[in-house]
Structure formats: C-alpha cells, structure tokens
Image (cartoon, rainbow, N blue to C red):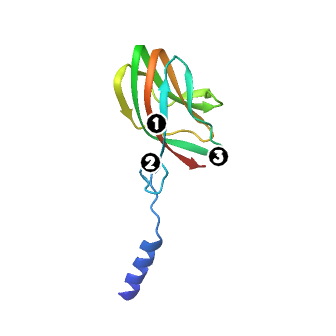
C-alpha cells in the first residue's frame, strides 16, 4: 500500500495537464489588443509570428456608422496578404462578443471593415510556438 501511495504521489507531482484550449491554461499568457477602426479598410491587429500561431480567445466589438461590417481574417504581410476568413462579416450592433479559436502558423490577424464604420473593441489571444 505504501508503494502504491508513493507511486501515486510521484505521478501526481510530476504530471502535466494538457489544455485543448490554451486560453484556459492557467500557465498561458493571455494578451489583448485594442481595436479602433474608423474607415473601410483591412487593419492588421496582430503581426505575423514566425514558427508560431495565435489562438484567439475572445473578442468584443461595437460597430456603428452607416451599414458597418467587420470580419476577422488571417494572412501574411502587413495587411494579411492572401487572406482567409476566420469569421463571417458582423453587421451593425451595439455589442458583439465571441470566441474564435486558432489561426494558422506564421500568419497575422486582420480586421476587414466595410461600409462607413466606427469599430471599437478588444481582441484577446495567446501565442503558441509551432
């Protein structure tokens, strides 16, 4: 019984827990970036990271203006060249909240805005080495 207890202690003491979503990992460094866009354009929110990827933990947006839209995309370059949509286009709303998930390695994250928008908010994320 003592061997079993000692073995169980060692397993528990040195075991690591793998989190499927790094946003909920207590050891993860969750960061955030402010979103402030006032024209119809592609705005880089997070730069390209080499040999790493972003997991987008959540966002909060407020869209006002004349038929404003906003959509998250990933791609390379300063304005997400070769973009791929991460979300659909969000339309005018006082507040939008959500969880996005993981982008591809060695890409940046952009917000594509349309109409005559004023987009304000925040995007939270974790960077993971690949």
Of circles 1 and 2, which is in front?
Answer: 1
Name the residue beneath numbered marker 3: 51
- State whether residue 88 is above or below residue 108: above
Name the residue beneath numbered marker 1: 123
- Mark 3 or mark 2: name the one nearer the start of the chain: 2
Residue at x 48% of width, y 53% of height: 28
Residue at x 43% of width, y 16% of height: 68
Label 2 crowd bin: few (<14), some (14–19), many (20+), radius 10 Å: many
For the residue pair 22 and 115, the one nearer the viewer reads as 115
Residue at x 59% of width, y 35% of height: 108
Q: Are marks 1 and 2 in contact (CB under 8 Å)?
A: no
Label 3 crowd bin: few (<14), some (14–19), many (20+), radius 10 Å: few
Coordinates of residue 60 in the picture (x, y in percent): 39, 33
Coordinates of residue 8 in the picture (x, y in percent): 40, 77
* Distance in Å between CA atoms under marks 3 and 2: 19 Å
* Distance in Å between CA atoms under marks 3 and 1: 21 Å
Label 1 crowd bin: few (<14), some (14–19), many (20+), radius 10 Å: many
Q: Which quarter of the rendered picture does the N terminus lie within? A: bottom left
Coordinates of residue 95 in the picture (x, y in percent): 34, 27
Would residue 105 be seen by someone viewing this image from the given angle? yes
- Mark 3 or mark 1: name the one nearer the start of the chain: 3
Q: Please indicate whether residue 116 sits to the left or right of residue 82 in the image.
A: left
> Residue 19 shows which numbered tag?
none
Would residue 89 be seen by someone viewing this image from the given angle? no
Name the residue beneath numbered marker 2: 23
- State whether residue 4 is above or below residue 114: below
User: How many numbered circles does the render carry?
Assistant: 3
- Mark 1 or mark 2: name the one nearer the start of the chain: 2
* Distance in Å between CA atoms under marks 1 and 2: 12 Å
Residue 62 location, quadrant: top left
Coordinates of residue 110 in the picture (x, y in percent): 55, 29
């Amino acid at each position: 019984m003592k061997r079993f207890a000692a073995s169980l202690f060692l397993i528990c003491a040195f075991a690591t827990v793998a989190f499927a979503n790094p946003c909920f990992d207590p050891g993860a460094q969750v960061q955030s970036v402010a979103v402030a866009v006032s024209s119809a354009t592609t705005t880089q929110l997070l730069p390209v990271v080499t040999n790493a990827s972003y997991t987008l933990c959540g966002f909060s947006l407020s869209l006002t203006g004349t038929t404003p839209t906003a959509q998250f995309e990933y791609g390379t370059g300063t304005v997400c060249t070769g973009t791929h949509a991460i979300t659909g286009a969000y339309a005018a709303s006082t507040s939008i909240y959500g969880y996005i998930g993981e982008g591809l390695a060695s890409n940046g994250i952009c917000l594509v805005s349309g109409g005559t928008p004023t987009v304000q908010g925040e995007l939270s994320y974790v960077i993971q080495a690949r």
